[in-house]
Every structure is written in structure tokens, then in C-alpha cells.
Image (tube, helix red, strand yellow):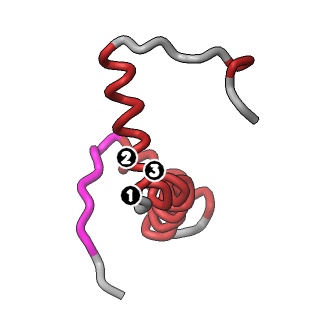
Amino acid sequence: MATATVRIPAEKRDILKIIAGIERTEMKVILSDLIDEYIERHKETLDLLSRPEWVEAIERGKKEVESGVPGKSLDELED
């Protein structure tokens, strides 16, 4: 497994060390778990952004908002 150096502010590093000690685990395990959780939370976003039709729809929507096109209420949206 390849490794990477990550700079963590001292205050956060110290808190992680305390947590690792309490949990009797290593900081690298905690960081790996946090990274896994972060990736899992963003999978759906990555999936949508990998579809050109969704990217185009998002861009159109952003332009509409910027140009002042009025939006729809929840009652006006289709199921």
C-alpha cells in the first residue's frame, strides 16, 4: 500500500492522539476510517458528475439562478 504524508494542525493532531490512546488504536487507522467515510458520503456526487447529461442540467440550472429565472415551489414540481 502506498503512503502519503498529511499535514495536520498540532491541535487536531493532539486530539487525535488522545482519541487513539483511548480507543487503543493507531492514528493511521482513525484517519483511514475518516477517509473511507468521506469517500462514501461523496460517491453519489461523483456518480452524478460522471454523467454528462447531469453536469449539463446542473450548469443550466446554475445559469438560470444567476440570471434570475424564478424557481418552482414544491407543489409545482412533478413527481
**Residue 52 versus residue 2 in the image, above or below:** above
Determine crowd level at label 1: few under 14, some 14-19, many 20+ residues with C-alpha closer than 10 A. few
Please state the horizontal and vertical placement of residue 68, each as a whole percent of the image.
36, 11
Q: Which residues are magenta?
A: 4-11
Residue 33 at what x, y percent from top left?
A: 53, 64
Residue corresponding to mark 3 = 54
Residue 15: assigned label: none
Spatial separation of the CA atoms under disc 1 and disc 2:
6 Å
Looking at the image, do the residues carrying marks 3 and 1 touch, with CB atoms under 8 Å apart? Answer: yes
Residue type (three-letter) at the residue carrying disc 3 = Trp
Secondary element type, mark 2: helix
The answer for how far apart the CA atoms under marks 2 and 3 are is 5 Å
Residue topped by disc 2: 56
For residue 14, above or below residue 79: below
The dot on residue 52 is 1
Marks 1/2 in contact by CB < 8 Å: the verdict is: yes
Q: Are marks 2 and 3 in contact (CB under 8 Å)?
A: yes
